Image (cartoon, rainbow, N blue to C red):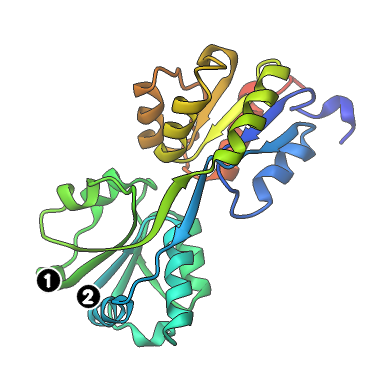
Amino acid sequence: MSNRSKRLDGETVIFTGTPKSNEAPAFVEREGGTVYSYPLIQVRSIHEEDDEIHMKRCEQATWLIFTSQSSVASFREKMERLDRTASHFRGKIAAVGTKTAAALERLGFTVSFIPTIFSADVFVKQFAPTKEEQVDVVFLRGSLARSILRDGLPFTIKEWTIYETVANESSIEPLIETLRQTTDPTVLFASPSAVDVYAAHVTPHVPWERVTVAAIGHVTERALQRKGATVDIVPETYTMIDLVRQVAKTKGRQL
C-alpha cells in the first residue's frame, strides 16, 4: 500500500487508555495515522491481609465474573502470590468481552459465558445461571466499577475489589499540548473513568468541539454525552481494534 492510498494520512489518533496490545496502534500507523498514547487512568492491584480468605471463597464460588482485562491481570497477580492455578477453582467463569475471555484462557480457565454485546448492562440481561448456581457468584471488580451488576442481577452477588483506578496526572499536560497543536485529532475513550479525568482536566483547556470523539461501548458513550461531548464514532463490536477500524472508515480518505 503506497503512502497516497493510506486512509489515515494526516490524521492524529490519541489513545486515552493503556492499549493491552499493540494491535490497534499498529493498525493506525499502517493506515498512515500518527499515534499518541496518554493513559488518563492507572490501575493498581490491591493487596490486603484477607486476600487468602477471599481467594478461598473464589475457589468455592459457583461463578466468577470478570468484566475487564484489568480485573484478570490483578487476579493473576493474586493467584501467583497465593500459589493458585486455574485448577483450584471449581466454578464457572463469565467474561465481558473476547479480550477478557482470552486473558482468562491464557491462565488456564474455560470461559462459559460471554454476553453478545460486551457491556455490563447487557451482561445482566443475558447472564442466567441456574437457581443452584446463584447462591455463590463472585464479581471481581475495580474500585470505580458501577453498580450495574449488583443492581441489575435478580439475585445477590458477592464482590471483591481487587484493583483501584486513579487518575494518571502525568498524562494531562502533554495531552493538552498535543491537542492544541493538532487539527481535528481523534480521541479514543474506552471507559467512563477516562472520560471523567478528561472532562475534569482537559476540556477546560480544549473544548469537545476541537476533537473527534470515538468511544468503545454505549456505557462510555453515555458517560461522554453526560459530560457534554458529541460522540462521533462507536463501533458495533466493543473492542479497541474495531474502534480504530471504524475511525479509518469514518475519517479515512476515499481510495
Q: Which label belongs to residue 135?
A: 1
Q: Report whether residue 206 is seen.
A: yes
Q: Which label belongs to residue 62?
A: 2
Q: Could you tell me which quadrant the C terminus lies in? A: top right
Q: Are marks 1 and 2 in contact (CB under 8 Å)?
A: yes
Q: Going by the picture, which residue comes out furthest to the top? A: 209
Identify which residue, 118 or 188, lies in the foreground. 188
Q: Amino acid at mark 1?
A: Val
- Please give the name of the residue rendered at 74% of the width and 27% of the height, measured from the top-left corner: 8
How crowded pointer 2 is (Cα within 10 Å; few <14, some 14-19, many 20+) is rated as: many
Q: Could you tell me which quadrant the N terminus lies in? A: top right
Identify which residue, 198 or 24, lies in the foreground. 198
Q: Amino acid at mark 2?
A: Thr
| On screen, residue 160 above or below 151 | below
Q: Position of residue 104 (x, y in %)?
A: 46, 69
- Please give the name of the residue rendered at 11% of the width and 74% of the height, measured from the top-left corner: 132
Under circle 2, the secondary element is loop
- Please give the name of the residue rendered at 27% of the width and 83% of the height, measured from the top-left corner: 56
Q: Is residue 109 left or right of residue 10?
A: left
How crowded pointer 1 is (Cα within 10 Å; few <14, some 14-19, many 20+) is rated as: some
Image quadrant assignment for residue 183: top right
- Please give the name of the residue rendered at 18% of the width and 52% of the height, measured from the top-left corner: 150
Under circle 1, the secondary element is helix
Q: Position of residue 58 (x, y in %)?
A: 28, 76
Identify which residue, 90 or 202, lies in the foreground. 202
Tell me the distance, in whole angstroms, between the alpha carbons under discs 1 and 2: 7 Å
Q: Report whether residue 182 is seen.
A: no
Q: Position of residue 52 (x, y in %)?
A: 31, 81
Which of marks 2 and 1 precedes in the sequence?
A: 2
Q: Position of residue 240 (x, y in %)?
A: 56, 44
